[in-house]
Image: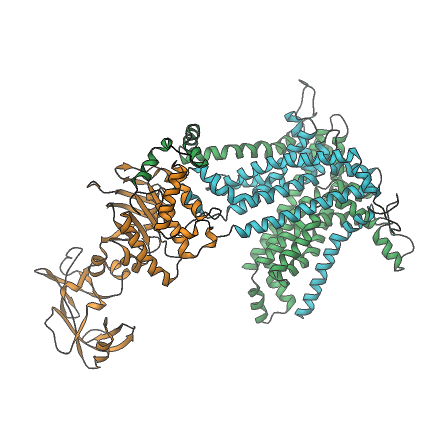
Chain colours: A green, B orange, C cyan
Amino acid sequence: MTYDASVRKDSDGLSRATGDRPFWGRLAGWGPYRAFAALVTASPRRQFVILATFPILWLLTQHLGPMLQMLRVSLVDAYPVAQDAPQAFTFDNYLRFFGDRIFWMPFFRTLTFAAVFTFCTLIITYPVAYFLARHVSRRNQMLMLLLLLIPFWVGEIVRTYAIMILLGNTGAVNLVLKWFGFIDRPIPFMYTSFSMGIGIVYLTALYMLLPLYSALEKLPKSYNEAAADLGAGAWTRFRRVTLPLTLEGISSGCTLVFLISTGFYATPVLLGGPSTTVFAETIAGFFHVAGDEWPTGAAFAVIMFVAALLITGVFQRLMKALRKGDTA
Amino acid sequence: MSASPLVHIDGISKRFGDAVALEHLSLDIAQGEFVTFLGPSGCGKSTTLRILGGFERPDTGRVILDGEDVTMQPPEKRHVNMVFQDYALFPHMTVRQNISFALELKGMDKTGIARRLDEIMSFLELDAYGDRYPGQLSGGQRQRVALARALAPDPALLLLDEPLGALDAKLRGQVQRELKSIQRQTHKTFFFVTHDQEEALTMSDRIVVMNHGRVEQDGTPEELYFHPASRFVAEFIGETNLLSGKMRGVEGEAVVMEWFGQTLRGHAPSGVPAEGAPITASVRLEKLGFHSSRPDLPNAVQGRVINRTFLGSRMAVDLLVEQTDGAKLRAFVDAETGQAIGDDLVWAAWDSDSMAVLRD
Amino acid sequence: MNRGNRIALACVYWAFVLYVFVPLILMILMGFKDSKFIGFPIRSWTLDWYTGVFSDAEVLYTFGYSVVIAVLSTLISVIVGTWIAVLLEGRRFWGRAVTFGLMVLPALVPGIISAIAFRIYARWLGIEPGMGAIVWAHAVHNVPFVSLVVMARLSTLPKSQIEAARDLGADPLIAFLRITLPYLVPAILGASVFCLLLSFDDFVRSFFLGGYEPTLPVLIFAMLRSGMSPEINAIATVALVLTAAIGIWAERFTRRTNKESQI
């Protein structure tokens, strides 16, 4: 190869090439593009500003905006209002919740249910995740996990409906029980906290399974072997080694499932009964009637969100303390 | 080329947080030179390379390339190309697409690109691999593609960031010779960065040894090897005997030092130390000769061989020196000589030119 | 001991598989039952419910409506989510942690609260309930999922790839288009499918932001409230088969391309 001066020259005369140029060469040499690129990439600082402006604006207006607007509406006396109608600042919407016991029951029920269902989901999915991560070969792990993912691509409503068919008075469970002669008359599973629990666990299991699985999968097998070597029995090994090291996965899975569980609306409506009304239904009620109930609904939503965040916050703190205590 | 250097580095410094990566580095590189920056990790060699490539901006100082101040220029504007440590070949592009990447962006037309591709691919013996993807190539082939890609736009300066690190030992020697011959044939200026002293010695016209962001020594491989300026250089390049003694004075060309009551004569490439100062001198292993009687050389000590290590073509001999507190000297001799030296007292001797008095 | 454990755990796994599959299988079976009455046992079979569904203009329209919403919202989510991911995975900047928090916010807000917050905000922005509002709400809600997937992929792109492109004469924009974007394709495709499914399956936001035209989940919900009918089984089964098929395909595709692009 010789020193080819023509190549170097080309770089100085971008626009002087005579023949047909490839797409990227044409783009890089195209005047308007060069002007645009020069403007955008003039300095790392400007580049960053241009990269960051749109996302920051989006996050503030689209992600934070709805939350702030909800907070604002919860603090006014009327919304939506006719144009130029007066709108006054008030705490009444919040006081309404604290002043009327009728709202307390669904509120506490929602939080209790969410906590109980989260715990159930944890108990059910932990062994499944453990089995996948610990006792299955790498190749099969993926397949067996994929198998579990399939039902979760199906929507909330369809899956809720499937649970209705399973648990109905003429549903599969009652049919089987009758066949085996355990019962004469169908057990009314439906429209109870039981049917609701089955449905919600069904809907949220994946959000627990995945964090648990990834936590367990990251855990080196040698830890357990070392513990066994030191004479720890299976239960001790689990309690002293596996469990503490997967607390982080448990913590994030539980947080996620708890937050999701508090927000279900359709599932409690379809699977629950009058005795299981959840706060989501209370909140929704304020938006179904025409008129100025929105501020109350917004206030109730804020109360619920704050309560859910507080509970998950305290929970995460606790888990963190537990983790620290174990490593110390 | 004109008499002015291709690259003129003018007092560049760089810090990353509290860590000093480069401290006031000034250096010229001539057109056609194969310069190697050598040093342990964190010595500032990679930072210098990245500043030349345009990936970092120095805190102070300037970089002049071909008469033009490029300190603030982004990488895409410089006539400088780089062979990355991990090659950084684009996995979704074929070998041809990888190599033509820069040519397209230079605005060359399709026939020009094809001509240049054929030329460079045949030069680097890559003709058969044009339509393969990087994932389908061996380590050595990838390395050549990376080189071809960087050479294709005919850069004024080629930067090589430890490009041989990923190759196995056997292939490395072959690639070293190839690289050197490519550099000779293309008359390109190579700026090579490595922590491997052997690599540096084999290929370079000039080696710059770096430590803690400063230049320890700058010279030809021979100068660095036989006349190290500092203890760091002596220890970093090759194996050496270090003798700690006291400065006595100057006698003509030679520097006189005292070592366990004996007078030794050496030379001081990095300047003559003050009289009475504690000093260290370096003697390369192959510079020591063995004699049964005291030879006519400025430096000779008596001792007993305590250990022999067979190394194939040669032998390493450890000598316990008499009348010291157990000082040892190590020497390379050919295998027969090594066997011939008995367990009796022998003389080990070396010339004053073979002993360099070092800067600490 | 260990072996006993293993068998017990395997039983739990397969029991869990039954738990997640049996309800869906029962539902599918029910769609072929030749009776207006939902429930077991099934004595005779029919395809009438399916032919009914496929000739029901309202169902078909709703189906198309849901698909259009899913596609439009996914387009927005993917562009915005990728942009945010590129910002967050790029150089460190002041306030990055807060930005990340804001990014995941919509995914963490419980469904009902998210729905009414969007309802209020849409009203404030002057967006009428209907397709536009649903597309917007779905788009915002799905952004975090795109960003998280793309960020995970982006974090595995060696820095030297971009530097090499710049070194060879590409400005930051061309380097992004020619190197970063092709590298992100599997992640973006995977995230797109996930967004399509999330949007297509979403009930609570569609319910609160919808106008007079229901999306498919809202239609099924409305039908369920007025009583179960085998037609719902057919609709739900079609939706199920479609979503599961797309999901499996996407999963396989992502896995394959992920493997291929490894150097």
- Most extreme residue toward the top is A84
- Left or right placement of residue A40 versus residue A303 in this view: left
Q: Inspect this view and state whether residue B44 appears.
A: no
Vertical comparison of B85 with C63: above or below? below
- Most extreme residue toward the right is A184
- Residue A318: give x, y in percent of width and height: 61, 51
- Residue B173: give x, y in percent of width and height: 33, 61
> Which residue lies at the image location 29% right of the left edge and 48% below the top edge?
B186
- Left or right placement of residue B101 versus residue C150 in this view: left
> Which residue lies at the image location 80% right of the left edge and 42% below the top edge?
C50
B226 or C32: which is nearer to us?
C32
- Most extreme residue toward the left is B252
- Left or right placement of residue B355 versus residue C190 in this view: left
B142 or A97: which is nearer to us?
B142
- Residue C224: give x, y in percent of width and height: 81, 40
Q: Quadrant of the N terminus of chain C?
A: bottom right
- Residue A210: give x, y in percent of width and height: 63, 52
Q: Inspect this view and state whether residue A174 appears.
A: yes
B229 or C120: which is nearer to us?
B229
In this figure, what is the number of numbered marks? 0
Vertical comparison of A108 with A128: above or below? above
Vertical comparison of A92 with C252: above or below? above
